[in-house]
Amino acid sequence: MTEEKALYNYLIRLGDNALILGQRLGEWCGHAHQLESDIALTNVALDQIGQARLLLSEAANLQGEGKSEDHLAFHRDEQDFRNNLLVEMENGDFGQTITRQFLFDVYQYHLLKAFCKSENDFLKAFAEKSIKEVTYHRSLSRDWMVRLGDGTENSHQKMQDAINLLWQYTGELFEMDESDEVLMEAGIVPDLSEIKSIWDKEVKTVIDEATLAIPDTRGFMATGARKKGEHTEYMGYILSEMQYLPRSMPDAKW
Amino acid sequence: MDEKKIYEILESVKDPEIPVLSIADLGILRNVEISEEGKLIVTITPTYSGCPAMDTIEKDILKALNSEGYDAEIKTSISPAWTTDWLTKKGRKNLEEYGIAPPAESTTDKSFLTGSHKELRCPQCKSTDTEMISHFGSTACKALYKCKDCLEPFDYFKCI
Ligand SMILES: [Zn+2]
């Protein structure tokens, strides 16, 4: 595999994570339990969409077929998306959304921190910009994990249920393939097993503080689904909502 | 190139969400140069990756320059990443008068991460007895605060 092809794959993977998570968080617009949370979740969504635009534009440039970020976002089918299953999981209640966000924020933060030392100019610049945003996301989700976990009996139970549900999708975040190997060799991306040990430690500290427990289903869903373009049943619904307009009216302009 | 004239034109382009801030005061105007064909190349940088005002700002810059007879092109650069340290003194003053508290610390001071903020002054009554309501406000670049003296909520231009 050439370095260029590996980088394209990697950018698509990062871009799809940001795009699908942004789309999911956007579903909260107008529905959260208080105005501040509504605004916070949609701010995080906006940051993710912004990051997705940068990543998919760069991927489209690299591809060199004259396609745009919009083409990649709106005109690819489900099996061509390479996001992690975690980000397509349902919002559920506020606690479930926060748990999904927390597990992903810690991952994204440390990944970006590693990209700040990348040999690739784009990835480095992208990370130096995005990490400022993700720092705020991580602080928001961490605060809510502790507040709800170490809250009432009811909120504690809901958070524990959310962790029990989502934990099985976290193993996949650290799966590596040939693209990782090629890019690691060139000093462009980090070894995800190193990110994993940092992630494990930080996530455990917060979950402990939140008086919650880590279930022992680790890595259950880490089956290489992403590599094959396999998704959960939710993905089709997300895409049909996100892609409907540009596909039915391909020439629509603002 | 008439630098003073071009600067005056660019100074007239404001952030559409905070109309008291020019793009220069906001620190998003990074560079102006002339291409070989005599075109002005204006480089700007987004505040946040998803800042929805960027498209409008680009159009406003082109409109302002074109109407004064300059042929221009906009380039967007994300590196070096925008920081609130680039807000000018004038920009900070205008923000406060407009009712938005300017960033209280520089990004080299990491106290904003631990929540131990420096004194933040209410833009309405100038009291420093204020508290944060939310890290996230009405736009990506602002947090939400409350003044415990005059009880008014206010926006804080958060430090990144
Ligand atoms: Zn006040």
Image (spheres, rainbow, N blue to C red):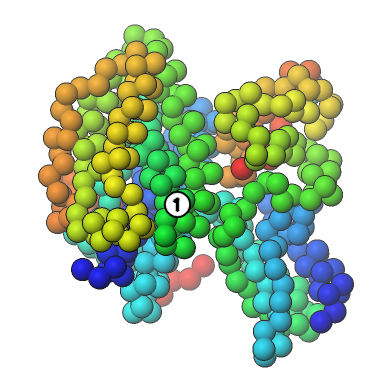
Q: Quadrant of ligand 1?
A: top right
At x 33% / y 74%, what residue is drawn?
Answer: A63
Residue B97 left/right relative to A135: right
Q: How many marks?
A: 1
Extreme residue toward the top, this view: A153
At x 27% / y 64%, what residue is drawn?
Answer: A6
Quadrant where the N terminus of chain B sits is bottom right
Q: Circle 1 sits in a helix, a strand or a loop, which is it?
A: loop
Q: Which residue is nearer to you in this view: B37 or A16?
A: B37
Residue A186 is situated, as x and y percent measured from the top left of the image, at 32, 61
Q: Amino acid at mark 1?
A: Lys
Residue B126 left/right relative to A249: right
Categorize mark 1 by other alpha carbons within 10 Å: few (<14), some (14-19), many (20+). Answer: some
Residue B42 is situated, as x and y percent measured from the top left of the image, at 68, 72
Can residue A22 be seen by looking at this rendering?
Answer: no
Quadrant where the C terminus of chain B sits is top right
Q: Which residue is nearer to you in this view: A3 or A173?
A: A3
At x 78% / y 18%, what residue is drawn?
Answer: B149
